Each structure stands twice: as structure tokens, then as C-alpha cells.
Amino acid sequence: MATALQFPANVSTLNNYNDLYPDWTQREVSTGTTIMAVEFDGGVVIGADSRTTTGAYIANRVTDKLTPIHDRIFCCRSGSAADTQAIADAVTYQLGFHSIELDEAPLIQTAASLFRDMCYRYREELMAGIIVAGWDKRRGGQVYTVPVGGMMTRQPVSVGGSGSSYIYGYVDSNYKTGMTKEECLKFTAEALTLAMERDGSSGGVVRLAVISEQGVERQVILGNQLPKFSTV
Amino acid sequence: MATVSVCQYHPGGFSFENCKRNALLEADINKLGFSSPAARKTGTTICGVVYKDGVVLGADTRATEGMVVADKNCSKIHYISPNIYCCGAGTAADTEMTTQIISSNLELHALSTGRLPRVATANRMLKQMLFRYQGYIGAALVLGGVDCTGPHLYSIYPHGSTDKLPYVTMGSGSLAAMAVFEDRYRPNMEEEEAKRLVRDAIAAGIFNDLGSGSNIDLCVITKGKVDYLRPHDVANKKGVRTGSYRYKHGTTGVLTKAVIPLNLEVVEESVQTMDTS
């Protein structure tokens, strides 16, 4: 991976295009984002919003931030769109190769470790916050979070992205152990809706996925079908 | 795994040696009141739409250098392969060379696989190259084509992120074009309707964005056929002068006339034959 040079702040005038080219044509594409993953007995529920921004312009309002890494392993991407897409492509390749070598389905922990290795090694160059979630035979449904900096830890419930700041209280107070699949779906949808309501960089539709032994079920909740909360 | 490609293991890459010097020069020049020369950008409105039988790509034809139009009729829809074309916004040189490099590599790849190239392959090659250069290659692309799996459309950003969507716009005029798309796009349009929609989206960019102008180029790609319509619509015709502004002979009265012959001596005469072989 190419190492980026550290530029002093005053050199940014090299890219001083005039007013003909608005700010958002020069900004990097960021996934802004709210992402979330919850473990339940028998699988995981993952969810994300669908907004990708370049500055103040929404470059893609129907983004799919839930990226399949393997048959029963997904990752939720937040941070720089280019960085997370490149990392996800690289890990998908590595995990596919590893799975063929093993001749069995890979572990979620393996996938999370691959993400962690890449995110930690290139931590100065990357801006990527990733939640890895899925189901495997050894430990069932698992959620591992790999935030910016390259730490990796397993959590029963994890939120990430710029919108996550607004829902830590909601998640901490409403999460209960032993929730069913339907309760987890409702919990995730409501948390994401609240974050999208308050965070400007999150919005669009809510994408959900349930990963279990049986496979992956995906669903989309459109804007007008989102859960309603009374806003003062 | 290395694929067959022309440009691998380039030990050069970018040299950042002169950046500090350039920054100091830039500051000095600004103090004197001048501005350093700007790279030629394509300003641009480019867009693409997926319709019933394929994709329609559209682009304006203005290339700007700062506030001056450098090229009134440049071609922004680049050939990638017989079934894949790519519109480019951003730095003109970057879009031109990037699309040529990937076109060349894709041709080798197609010969190696023995199949018509897929749009997803071109997308992968472009995004991996742009990510490698961490955004220093200023190429924002709209990639579209039809392959064995159907019609596909991608938008590719300079840092290497891509989006696969049914309609995309890029460039300084992309907001104007996107407004038209968001209003009138429907899935599974007919060809004429799709061409009208793309034409109107580019026109919105041309008339509402200073960085875009001149004509509208279209490229309609279907299974087995490509219509490269350049120009599809001459939106800005050069004005015709309504009258002649030359003065008739005798307009200015001649008061006096003095003829002074200059006597020049021939000092030296030499003949140099031109090599016309």
C-alpha cells in the first residue's frame, strides 16, 4: 500500500483551485455513517444507514455499507469510502484463499484478525472504522469491532461511525442479554433511526441483515417506513 | 496475484522532492501579485444512466485552464473496450492517461481470458490504481458498459472509492445534472427517453455551471452496438455577426502623401539549400 507523505498545513495551497470548482469536488468521499451490530443466540443482526458524503454533498444516498466478506461473514464500513472498500476487497481475497486452503468455512475471529492486521499496520495512512460480524460453527454469532487505530475486541453489541455518538445512551440503556432475532432487529432499526435523525452525515435508508446458520437475510427500511419517535 | 498487464512494478511513482520549493515559490509569487499556472481541468458535467437495453453516457465538451476555456470541443468520453466507455472529470491529463492505461491492460486481459471484458473488471482495475495513488491522480470517472451479465454503471472517485448505481453524475456541474436525474429518472426507460434525459442533464450542467459548456456528447452502449454521438447536440452555437465592421475605402480622408524610397545595398548574398529529401 502506498505510504502517504505528511504534508505541513501551509502546503495545501498547492491545490488552490478557484471558485469554479466547489469544495465538494476536492474533498475525499467519506461514509459519514452510523453502523451497528448485535449478537443473539444463533446469529447476529447488523445494520447501517445509506449515506456517503463528499463535504456537504451526498454522493450516494443508497450506499450499501454492509459488505459480504464470506458466506456468513459481513463487515460494516465507516470512515473513508476508498480506504474501507480497498481493505474489504483485500480481506475478502485473503479470507477466500484461507478458506480454500482450510477446506472449511473461516472463523469470524480470523476475518476480524485480518482486518485488525491491516488497520493496525497502516494506521497512519488509513481512516477506517469497521465492525466485523457473522456466524460460525465454533462460537455461533459474534461481533468484533475494529475501530480507527487498529484495536480489535469482541462485544455483544457494537456501534460505530459519526452517528454512533448520539446513540450510546440509547444502546446502553435498551440492550438486554438474551434478546430474540426480532427484538434485535427492532432494537437496531430504532437505534439507527435515532442516529440518522441527529447526525447530518447519516441518513437515507436503513439496511439490515441477519446472519445465522441458515444463511443471510437482508432487508431495507425506506424513509417513510422508519420507526417514529416524537421529536420535541 | 499479478495479472497480465503493461504497467507493473513501476519503481518511480511520484517524486515529492520539489514540494517544499514549490510552496516557497508559490508564497513569493503571490506576494508579487501573480498566480502560478493552473493545471488544465475539464471543469465538466458528465453523467450516465442505465436504461432498458443498456447504458447512456453523456458529457459536455469544455476544457478549462483557470478561468479561460482551453478547448471548446474536447472529447471526454473515452474508449475502454468495444463494450465499455468511460467519461472523465477532473484533471484532463489524469483522466486521459488513466483510461488509456486501463484500456490497454484490459485488452491484454481479454486476450488472456478469451472473453469480452466485464465492466466490473474495468472498475476493479481503475479503483485499485487510483487507491494506490491515494487521490493524487485527479480522475473522477463515470464508467459504463454492457457485458454478458447485463448493463452496468459505476462512478469512481479520485481516492479510489466506487459506487454502483442506476444513474450517476460527476464533475463541477454534477449537482445541476443530478437535479434533472432525481426529477425524471425511471427504471427501464426506452432508448429515446434515456437519451433525452441524459441530454437534458448535461444541458443543465452546461447552462448552470461555469466550468461546463459547449456541446453535448452522448454514447449509447447496448449489447453488441455502440453509438458514439459526437456531437449529439450543439447547445452553444458560435454567434453570427450581424454586420460587417470593415470601413469602406475612402472613409478616412487623405490629407498629404509623401513617398521616401529606402536605398538598401546588398552586402552579402548566400544560398542555403533546404533538405527536401
Image (tube, helix red, strand yellow):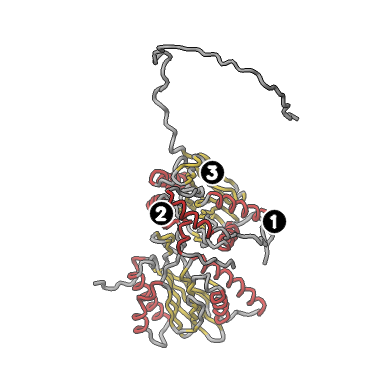
The residue that mark 2 highlights is A22
The residue that mark 1 highlights is B114
Instruction: Select label 3 or label 2 by which is in front.
Output: 2
Secondary element under disc 2, as helix, strand or loop, is loop
| Chain letter of the residue carrying label 1 | B
Assess disc 3: are there few (<14), some (14-19) or many (≥20) residues with their C-alpha within 10 Å of its C-alpha. Answer: many
Disc 2 + disc 1, Cβ < 8 Å: no
Q: Give coordinates of residue B55: x percent, y percent.
A: 52, 51
Secondary element under disc 3, as helix, strand or loop, is loop
Distance from label 3 to label 1 (Cα)?
30 Å
Query: Can you say whether A214 is above or below B91 in the image?
Result: below
| Chain letter of the residue carrying label 2 | A
Mark on residue B75?
3
**Amino acid at pointer 2:** Pro
Distance from label 2 to label 1 (Cα)?
44 Å
Q: Give coordinates of residue B204: x percent, y percent.
A: 40, 46
| Chain letter of the residue carrying label 3 | B
Q: Residue furthest bottom?
A: A177
Q: Is residue B108 left or right of residue B123?
A: right
Q: Give coordinates of residue B90: x percent, y percent.
A: 50, 52
The image quadrant of residue A50 is bottom left
**Amino acid at pointer 1:** Gly
